[in-house]
Amino acid sequence: MMYRDAVKIMRQADDSDPWAGGSAGNMSETYRARVTFATQRVIGENGQEVTSSVHIRMPGKVPVGYGDEVTFKEPNGNEKTKKIIS
C-alpha cells in the first residue's frame, strides 16, 4: 500500500484518554498516510454505531486517541480537521 498522503495529528491537551498513551497536548505531528473517502458504519468510543466518511491508514503503530484531531486534504484540495470517532 502506498502512503501518498500526509495527515497532521493534534494531540489532546489532557490525559483523560487512557488510549492516547500520555501524549503531550497542543503539539501537531505529521505522518505519512493513505486517506480514502468512503461511507462506512463503525463502532464509536462508547460502543454506539456511527457513520464514518474518511478512513486513514498509517504505517506502523501511531498512538491516536478519541480526543485527538486529524487534519487532512480532501480530493478538491481543501483542508479538513476532524475528531477521531473509531
Image (cartoon, rainbow, N blue to C red):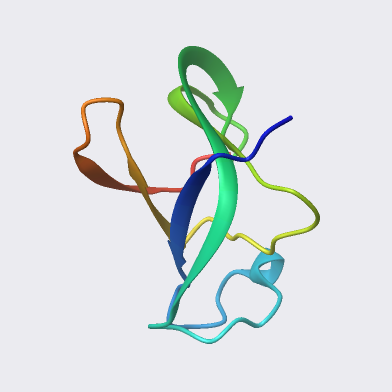
Residue 47 position within the rendered picture, expressed as x and y whole percent measured from the top left: 62, 34
Taking the spot 59% from the left edge, 52% from the top edge, the residue there is 32
In the rendered image, is residue 45 in sight?
Answer: no
Number of dots carrying numbers: 0
Taking the spot 48% from the left edge, 51% from the top edge, the residue there is 6
Q: Is residue 63 left or right of residue 26?
A: right
Q: Is residue 59 left or right of residue 47?
A: right
Image quarter for residue 23? Answer: bottom right
Residue 64 position within the rendered picture, expressed as x and y whole percent measured from the top left: 61, 60
Quadrant occupied by the C terminus? top right
Q: Is residue 10 left or right of residue 76?
A: right
Residue 26 position within the rendered picture, expressed as x and y whole percent measured from the top left: 38, 83
Image quarter for residue 10? Answer: bottom left
In the rendered image, is residue 18 in sight?
Answer: yes
Residue lying furthest bottom: 24
Taking the spot 59% from the left edge, 69% from the top edge, the residue there is 17
Q: Is residue 68 above or below residue 51?
A: below
Q: Is residue 78 above or below residue 62?
A: above
Q: Is residue 75 above or below residue 70?
A: above
